[in-house]
Amino acid sequence: MEYETIIGLEVHAQLLTRSKMYCGCSADYAAAPPNTHVCPVCLGMPGVLPTINRQAVEYTIMTALALNCTVQVNTKFDRKNYAYPDLMKGYQISQYDAPFGTEGWLTIEADGQKKRLGIIRVHLEEDVAKLTHRAATPAEAFAHRTRASEEAYSLVDVNRAGAPLMEIVGCPDIRSPEEARQYLVKLRTILQYLGVSTGNMEEGSFRCDANISLRPMGTQELMPKVEVKNMNSFKAVYRALEYEVERQKKVWDTCERVVQETRGWLEEKGVTVSQRSKEQAHDYRYFPEPDLPPLVVGREWVDAIREKLPELPEDRRDRFVREYALSAYDAGLLTGSKAMADYFEACVKEAGVPKTELTKKAKEIANWLLGEFIRLLNVSNIEINTSKIRPKALVELLKLLEQGKISSTAAKTVFEEMFKTGKPAAELVASLGLAQLSDAGELARLVGEVLVKNPQAVGDFKAGKEQAIGFLVGQVMRATRGRADARTVGELIKARLAG
């Protein structure tokens, strides 16, 4: 039987505020010792009163506007009640039926076509504490004459409890794991452009839960859905959804019924496992937060926030095409990361070329960023804004190449050393002996030696095999350690063989 995949994503993003959501504790706790950024409000002590973080509210409204949502005038906070070890108060101050933003959307590229994916709501809540589970080693268990499971325990770090957390609930409009990945990439990019969140999945500041179900193709029947958790990368989301699609297909094909439940993704095994039966909204016993009054969002406030919205990814991509004459594809790659787009424009500004040469220089910079630079970034698993090569240093390297002081081959060698060490291009050119070979007589001598040593390639070229010239050029470049200009070498070889 043919099935249609139905996916809806719930994304939690930690907001970049100085203090927590409902108290004055610092939200900069990443490097702090456990349980040092806490207060009676974080700990849920009797008699304490929460207060609303205005900056977190503004960031949430800003996000709602960027996602084309309707910002609600009348909003309120609610208590979401459930018992779990990482929830200090026994309830979470969240929003239920009056969120800040509703009925929005964002677009992705799917199969060469733009697809609009709906956003149900954008609301604000608080994060929970962090649990660290520890199992005893076999040696510890042996020393105490117990089973390892009896020696297991969990630690609670309350530093994260109460940090402002924005939840973005998507419509079940996604039809494949790839569309889910594109949705998450686009959403994270928007949050980074807004400056409201780091969007770092590995650090937990951008977390995703996926609801997935299958239904017979061509029907509108709602089937039991499964929520998948514990995915800390785009790749993990893609793999977990792929696995779950196949698992649910097998269940339906054997005439069994998919159980509505929460499942966890085990990255090392590449499988999802059952964690608990799926809760319904009424299980949380929502009711209005009695310690916080309803919040009225005035139109003037919304308009003021709207005026502060920065240039968003799609607008920046269109400007790159228009202003720098880049292809839509290259502009999309550059603006897919705010850090990459900022770096590109910093390089263009640093180059300081006249308008008549702007598009040529922009294309050259884009080629380096999307070629050698992105290759090394991927290998090193770092972002461009943390690399040792700053925009000014890259532009200096390109100037040496443009002035003919180094060859294109040598430039790539120098670039890799710059990436490793952060040293200036000119210093590396000198220390590595990679200055362009400018002695015409020496170059002619080396070309002659290569032709004598490679009679087969010479014969192939004279017989009409043009590709043989590439081999000969490569031999000369090797002899000069990349210090010669490949185009000049090719011309010399052709002139010598023509004679």
Image: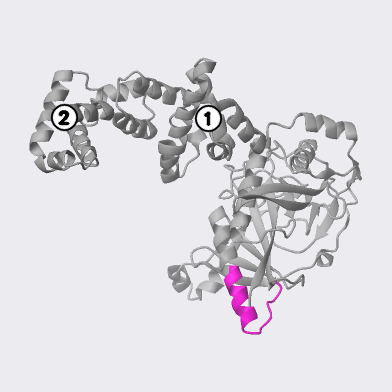
| Residue 451 occupies quadrant | top left
Q: Quick check: 272 left or right of 282?
A: left
Q: Quadrant of the N terminus?
A: bottom right
Give residue 43's position: percent from left, percent from top.
Answer: 74, 51
Q: Which residue matches tag 1?
A: 343
Give residue 290's position: percent from left, percent from top.
Answer: 91, 51
Please name the residue shown 80% across and 36% down the image: 54
Mark yes or no: residue 483 visible. Answer: no
**Badge 2: residue crowd in 10 Å (few <14, some 14–19, many ≥20):** few
Q: Quick check: 431 left or right of 247?
A: left
N-term-proximal mark, 1 vs 2: 1
- Secondary-structure class at tag 2: helix
Q: Which residues are magenta?
A: 244-261
Please name the residue shown 57% across and 48% down the image: 203
> Residue flagged by tag 2: what amino acid is it?
Ala
- Front residue of this view, candidates 88 and 187: 187
> Residue flagged by tag 1: what amino acid is it?
Tyr
Q: Quick check: 123 left or right of 200?
A: right
Point out the residue furthest to the top here.
354
- Secondary-structure class at tag 1: helix
Measured in 3D between alpha carbons, the distance from the residue under mark 1 to the one under mark 2, in whole angstroms, is 47 Å
Q: Quadrant of the C terminus?
A: top left
Point out the residue furthest to the bottom here.
255
Give residue 59's position: percent from left, percent from top.
Answer: 75, 38
**Badge 1: residue crowd in 10 Å (few <14, some 14–19, many ≥20):** some
- Front residue of this view, candidates 88 and 57: 57
Please name the residue shown 48% across and 76% down the image: 145
- Front residue of this view, candidates 90 and 252: 252
Q: Is residue 39 magenta?
A: no
Identify the disc placed on residue 498.
2
